[in-house]
Image (tube, coloured by chain):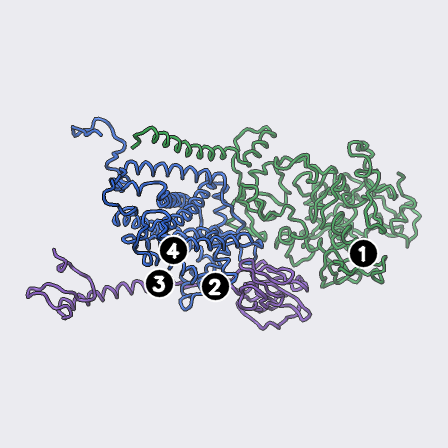
Amino acid sequence: MSFPTSPYPRKVRLWRKNKSFIYNLHPPQIPASSARFTYTFGLGGIAVLTAVLTTLTGLLLMFYYEPTLQGAHASLVLIDSVVYLGHFTRALHYWSAQVMVVAVILHIARIIFTAGYRPPRDVNWLIGLGLLVITLMWDFSGYVLCYDSDTIWALLVGTNLLKELPGVGHTLYLLVVGDQALGPSAILRFYTWHVFGLTLLGLGGIGYHIWRIRVDGGISRPVPTSGASRQFVPRETLFFRELITVLIVTGGLVLLSTLAPPPLGPPATLNRVGSDVVLAPWFFLAIQQLLRYVPPLWAGWIIPLAGLAFLALLPLLDRRGPGRGYWFAPERWRPQAAFGGLLLVIIVLSLLEWLR
Amino acid sequence: MSKNQDIVISVMPTKDNFENGPTQANTLTRRRFLIALGNLSLLGALWSVARGSIRMLTPPVSRIPSPIIVAGPPDAFEAGRLTPLEQGPVFIGRDQAGLFALSAVCTHLGCTLVADDEGPTCPCHGSHFSTDGANLSGPAPQPLPHLALAINDDGLLEVNLSQIVAPDLRIGDN
Amino acid sequence: MITTSKQAYLFFSTSLLLLTALTILFWGQLAEDWKTYQQAYLFQTNQPGQPAVQQIIPRLGPDGQPTPDASPELCLTCHMGLAEISPSHPVESFGCVICHRGTGLALDKEQAHAGLLPNPSDLAVAAESCGQDNCHGGYADPTRNHVDQVTRSLQATYAGGIAMIRYTFGVQKDLAASFGVVGGVDPNPLSDTVSSLTAYQPQQDALPMETQFAQNCLTGGCHLTTPPIEAPYFYRSTGCAACHVLYNNDGLYTGADPTIARDEPGHAATHQFTTAIPYTQCNHCHNRGNYSLRTMTFTPRPDLPPAGPPLSEMMPTEGRRLVEYYQPIGQFTLCEWELDCADCHTQAEVMGDGHFWPDQKTMQYIQCRTCHGTLTEPPTTVEITDAEDPALRLARLNDHYSLGMGDVVISTARGEKMGSVQLRGEQLVQFSQVDGQEYVVPPVMGSDCQQQPDEQESRYCHQCHAYQR
């Protein structure tokens, strides 16, 4: 580092590292045990990266997508077929969104397996669960905006599930769909939520979530034992590790988007079913399986919300004791087993539905 | 500044320091009364904004098109099978007594049914119905309703998707 | 930030990964299918230029009405070189999607062909494409609803054949036609037509020969709704295109569209409609062989492919017409060789007139005397006086003869006007609809013909006028 001795700098600096925005968002140093890749796997960062990628590709798609009954599918065909790199932009938008959902779920799993929700991080845990809901709503609303014959049933069943809620069901349906039945208002409202409402909530939530990490004392780690030397990792190293992760994940997503673009079915029509197989979006397959056997209020609302409530209550049930900062700490086997069981049940139900 | 002198916006009056020394916590002073009124007004403002927003987002008009669809000439529908229509989720069936219209909207969560040989089935959650609409298996809670059928002035069959009729009602070809 | 070589290697390899991924992406952009097809077409036709997306914004929308906000159709980007289907269906007005459906905005083959009707004139789908309102259907005047007429024509219902087979095997007690390949109801039957036909679907308990008949003869082979036998001389389409889209005898495509294989039989000669239908087109079904009722099979004639010599060994063109036209079991007059089928057989006979005719004998009514007259009566003629006369429209559709107001043409026994047989001065002249050649029609009145007045069927004319093979 050289300090300019005259008011006029002798060489032109492209980037003043010490004064750059993202660099200074990082703490000057963090404990080495928090910064290990095999501790966090960078999942929270991957979630943020994929959120940013989805937002940027989404902005590009907004120049062509038309949220109208006739225009929705037709504009997507235009994007896929004719717009230069349109199919790639849509594929990248799709894949970074799906990777975001996976990263968020794995990130929650990591927090549970390392007791990262223990106080003082319990408020941030709730914020994070809210972000999970926002991410799923983002994915769902984007999924139905394709408005093709495979996804229209997800929109129909999902909005009809609103009507199952006692008392507020019909009002909620009117607010979400914007009319008595699916039509032009539904597409516009889902589009507005997907593009703006959820983005405001999501980006704001992510910002608050990250800020609270610093307020709560950084990424969780084992309680330091007295006498042991404490190692720190400077923010330069942290920034470098994040840069490598960005390069790898972005490269992988670009490759995935080029080689495996998402399909687009024929235009949606509610009057006829196109095929005999109707599948919910992959993250709701378990709910579709439940809906076959369990009344809709339970399968669509009570059971999923109970699962969410269980996750929200974890900090209350597992407040103290050893095990914070370690993966699979045996003293904390109960919450880990409960979460593992919940995940297993969801995966099994999803596979049952998918393999029909 | 000590904590007690922070400006607190709260409904409950708290301990504060006045010129004559601290006042008891549950004494209603002028200051506390005014603060409480101010808080209530703000709450009232917030509440009216919230109600107004919800009312604004509640749709004032409906853009759903007319529920009457034209099915076609009556003799295009043959006996022994439920013919699905392209213009709306409804089956037209014919038995010895005449023509009838069976709703093709699953009574579970609204998916459009597929006409199988044994009767309509729902591809979403696997409900099965009989050819006259009874819910045989699966999560559907109710049988399929029959919809109002009529011959219009051009001699074509017309279905009213929003009008339910008795299941034994039939109409003739003219 | 990067202080060690390990970090530098890591940075280099991950940036390279990203760059490689982007390279694969941009490289894939260069070789898209539609560019390959266009380059093939431009190369074949020696045209300069780079591949570019071709779009058409059709003027007409569904139901043949002008529509202001039609979406662009990019079909011609890959199918560059495809001929315009006909001058009556200009592609700038119609586009492609109005008939063929599909997804016009897509450039990917699967996406573009989703919902496509490769043959929109197939009778199963013709009502939604050819038969749309203001096109060939939906008119108050039934003679303009061609899709309805063809669907009820004898070539579509096969009513007489079905009745004959069932009568022969004792399943029905007379020759009355009650079944057809397609069924339906005619609200205004004539005295010798049937008011309704039921779709013919032999049940499980029918005679084995009935199910065999339905299977062997009515679901494949020679029928307006069935695909053809895949052999030379049999290749054809279905529905309206079975007659109006010409196929070569070898079934090969000879147009300029680079996406259609030139060596794959089973394609039309070019993507064009015509009303100048030569005998070879009719002979993709007719005069192809014989059936055996005993075995319920069809035996192709032995003197032509596929049973006979291959196409490459066939005799040259001059003698071909005589051999190819009719089977070597019949004898016909010279005009039945020289003219094409469509020069005599009328529109009502071939395309139907909306009624369910019970059999070919009752339906087919054209006779030699319609044009040649009898010993005592000249042929019936009529003058074109109405500017909206269908005969004028038909003449505009055919390049090989012309018709104007005030022209005098032959009128058949059922009142159809034969626009290609016209009175020129004192002579009756027939213009071939296929090549425009003029034939003078010799009248019977005043000739040495020795016909009996009540023996007017063609077999009586054949007794003297049959052309020896």
- Give the x, y percent position of residue C102: 58, 47
Badge 1 density bin: few <14, some 14–19, many ≥20, Cα 10 Å: few
Badge 2 density bin: few <14, some 14–19, many ≥20, Cα 10 Å: many
Against C271, residue A314 (above or below) is: below
Q: Amino acid at mark 1?
A: Pro
Q: Residue at x 47, y 35 (%)?
A: C25
Residue assigned mark 2: A296
Residue assigned mark 4: A334
- Give the x, y percent position of residue C319: 83, 34
Residues at circles 4 and 2 in contact by the CB criterion of under 8 Å: no
Residue A192 visible in rendering: no
Q: Label 1 vs label 3: CA separation?
A: 71 Å
- Chain that is blue in the image: A
Tell me which chain the residue with mark 4 is part of.
A
Q: Amino acid at mark 4?
A: Arg
Which shade of the palette goes to chain B? purple
Q: Amino acid at mark 3?
A: Ile
